[in-house]
Image (cartoon, rainbow, N blue to C red):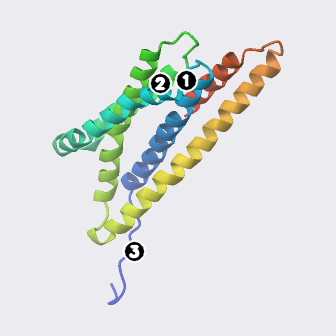
Amino acid sequence: MESGKEKRYEGTFGSRSSFVVVMIVMMAMFSAMLLLPIFLQNALGYSPLDAGLVMLPGGIVMGIMSPITGRLFDKFGAKWLAVIGLALVANTLWQFAFITLHTSYGMIMILNTLLMLGISMLMMPVMTNALNELPPALYPHGTAVVSTIQQVAGAVGTALLVTVMTNRSRLYIEHAPGTKDDAVVQIMGMRGSFPFS
């Protein structure tokens, strides 16, 4: 290697796949944080306070799980945490696809809490695994890239899922022109958007 020149880091499959997982998880998290309160207020008629309280246990679980996940990562590595977390996230999003006007407030809270638990089991191990593959000199750059990816993925995921929800609602109205119940229309849009995430 010539003096004065830094060795170029090409990346590995592990770091690239970790960044992809981070993007997918951030899209799911931000989308759920946006869609659930809208659904609870507009379709089920809950107050903004009640809609916010649904999100509270999930946030608490994420805060509690952060140090626990760190210890589990040190003991077992990223693979099993990521697999379990991804399974929780996928299953919870799938369950959200079957919510109805009769789904209880408590069930929605439990599903959101499980979603946040899965995300908390994914985020730290996957990001740490990706950054561990970098040379120490590139740690600051890696952290900056991960932060940027999180913000961009959250914005893209939110815009994408709101678009899907709107289009599914419009299609439902077109195929059921006699429908006048806004709650039913919105729930059909929600049910179409959650599996997409």
Point out the frontmost of discs 2 and 1. 2
Residue under pointer 1: 40
Q: Is residue 51 visible?
A: yes
Q: Which residue is mark 3?
A: 8
Which residue shows up at 56% across the image and 43% down it?
Answer: 157
Q: Residue 55 falls in which quadrant of the image? A: top left
In front: label 3 or label 2? 2
Q: Is residue 92 above or below residue 6?
A: above
Q: Which badge, 1 or 3, is on the more N-terminal residue?
A: 3
Amino acid, disc 1: Leu
Marks 3 and 2, how far apart at CA:
52 Å
Kindly give the residue lying farthest to the top in the view shown. Answer: 102
Amino acid type assigned to the residue bearing label 2 in the image: Asp
Q: Residues within 10 Å of mark 1 (few under 14, many from 20)?
A: many
Figure disc tally: 3
**Which residue: 51% across, 12% down?**
103
- Side of 7 where 72 appears, left or right: left
- Whether tag 2 and tag 1 are in contact, CB under 8 A, the answer is yes
The residue beneath circle 2 is 50
Percent position of residue 143, x then y:
37, 61
Q: Does residue 141 sit above or below 124 in this rendering?
A: below
